[in-house]
Image (cartoon, helix red, strand yellow):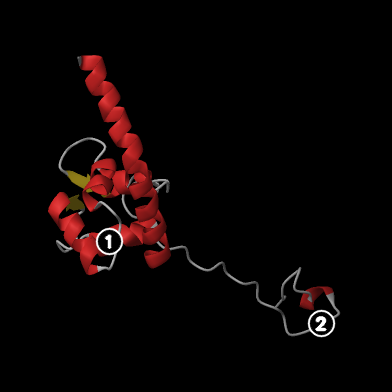
Amino acid sequence: QQQQQQQQQQLQQQQRRPALSEFRRWALLRFGHAEAAFRALDLAGGSGRLGAGDFTEALRKHGCRVESPHDVFLQLDVHRRGAVGMADFLEALGQPVVELPRPLPLSGGPRPAPTPAARPRRAAGRGSASGSPLFGATA
C-alpha cells in the first residue's frame, strides 16, 4: 500500500513538471530573471514568502495562464511549508542562489584616511649639483 502511494505521488509529480516548465518560461520572458519574477509576485509588499493563495492571485494579476497554478506552487514548495521563499523559488526555476561575501570587520577600530605623500620640492637652479632635485637646494 505504501509503495503504491509513493508511485502515485511520483506520477503526480511527473504530470506537474510541464506546468513548472511553462511557468518558468513565462516568468523569465516576462521579468527577465527569476529574482525579478519573485519580487513582482510577492504581492504582500516584500514579505519574502509566497503563499499558495497569494501566488495564484499574483499569477492572475500579471497575466500568467499556466494550466494549473496550484501544481506549480506545489513544485515550488519543495519543503511543504505552505509558502515559498526566494531561495526555493530560484532553485526551482534553475537559477543559482548567489550569496555575496560579507565584508570582514575591521580590527582595532576605524583606520585613519591615508595622507598624500609629500612631494619633493625642486630647487630653482638647474644644471648644477646644488640645483638638482636629487641633491636638493643648498643655502
Q: What residue type is labelled 2?
A: Arg
- Give the secondary structure at mark 1: helix
For residue 126, the mark is: 2
At x 72% / y 72%, what residue is drawn?
136
- Would residue 9 appear left or right of 20 to someone viewing this image? left
Residues packed near mark 2 inside 10 Å, few (<14), some (14 to 19) or many (20 plus): few
Residue that lies at the very extreme toward the bottom in this rendered image: 124
Classify mark 1: residues with Cα within 10 Å, few (<14), some (14-19) or many (20+).
some
Please give the name of the residue rendered at 37% of the width and 65% of the height, measured from the top-left corner: 31
Q: Which of 139 and 3 is in front in this view?
A: 3
Q: Mark 1 points at which residue?
A: 39
Side of 51 relative to 15 (left or right) = left
Relative height, residue 55 to residue 129 (above, below): above
Where is residue 11? Give x, y as percent: 32, 31
Kind of residue at disc 1: Arg
The residue furthest right is 127
Q: Is residue 106 among the parts visible in the rendering?
A: no
Q: Which of 75 and 33 is in front in this view?
A: 75
Quarter of the image with the N terminus is top left
Report if residue 4 is visible in the image: yes
User: Mark 2 falls on what kind of element?
Assistant: loop
Q: Closer to the camera: disc 1 or disc 2? A: 1
Query: Residue 138's x, y, as percent?
Result: 72, 75
